[in-house]
Image (cartoon, grey):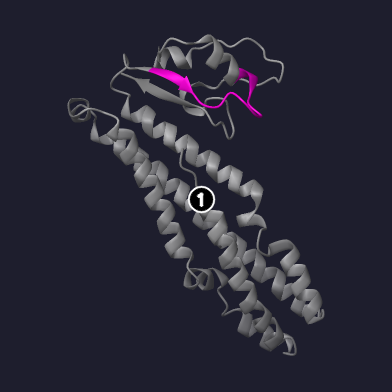
Amino acid sequence: MANLDFYTIELEKIQKELFDKLEKVVTGLKDLSDRELLRITGQIDLFEEMERLGYGTLLGRVGSAYDDQIALAFAELTRRELAKVPAISITTLEQIKALDMDYLSEGVQQYARQLKSAMVRNLVARESIDDILVNLRKSFGPGNIISSKQFKFLINDAFARFQHTSRAKAYEEFPNIKFKYSGPTTGNRRDSCLHILNKYKEPLTREQIDNLKIPPQKDNSVFQGFIARGGFNCTHDWIRVE
């Protein structure tokens, strides 16, 4: 199952390049008067700089990954089935994609504004260049906020949900098609997922899947249906059975 790991990896590289530039900027601004400092920093747009460093291209790659998932979901259908899919199904997925893309872009814009604000505060406080850069790197440097491990998990989970939403929309007009739960059984797996893998050997329809009643599990995990499956960062999938 595809993921967006490349997004945070490349974004961390952009952060690194941005901070290489910021070091020179902070050094150049350090001895300005408050009036000059505020005038010049008012003209600085760190999000625009990140776009020059490749963020726009990176966001385009994310958009292409979403498009690929829509195409893959509908590629599972036969030509006869595909002809019965209403256009609104694809339009709906494209709208979800747009919302997710806006979320990523707005997050980076907010990051850029917060970074600029912190930089200006530190300069106005007349801290040393070394202290300013250390403080900025600690809070906003590569691997923080928009490229953190926590954020990577969040966007990959959202992307996984989009993948399964795409498949759900592809099969929406065909309630009798059946699926079988598939995925790893070893390692750190939720008990609810293992319960389904072990108990439900026969294929199930989408309605049957969403209505599954799983008894309380030792790890308190809960099965959440066709799209969410075992929940956050679930590695299992419902595979069509011909």
Considering only vertical position in the picture, is 11 above or below 48?
above
For residue 136, side relative to residue 163 (left or right): right
Q: Residue at x 35, y 46 (%)?
A: 67
Q: Position of residue 38 (x, y in %)?
A: 66, 82
Task: Please name whichever residue, 225 or 16, is drawn nearer the observer in this view of the structure.
Answer: 16
Quadrant (top left, top right, bottom left, bottom right) of the C terminus: top left
In which quadrant of the rendered view does residue 77 lie? top left
- The residue to which callout 1 is attached is 103
Task: Please name whichever residue, 214 or 111, is drawn nearer the observer in this view of the structure.
Answer: 214
Considering only vertical position in the picture, is 64 above or below 57?
above
Q: Residue at x 59, y 14 (%)?
A: 195
Q: Residue at x 65, y 53 (%)?
A: 148
In which quadrant of the rendered view does residue 34 lie? bottom right
189 in the magenta segment = yes
Q: Position of residue 179 (x, y in %)?
A: 39, 18
Q: Position of residue 172 (x, y in %)?
A: 32, 24
Question: Which amino acid, mark 1?
Answer: Tyr
Q: Which residue is farthest front? A: 186
For residue 200, side relative to residue 175 (left or right): right
Task: Please name whichever residue, 226 or 235, is drawn nearer the observer in this view of the structure.
Answer: 235
Considering only vertical position in the picture, is 43 above or below 118?
below
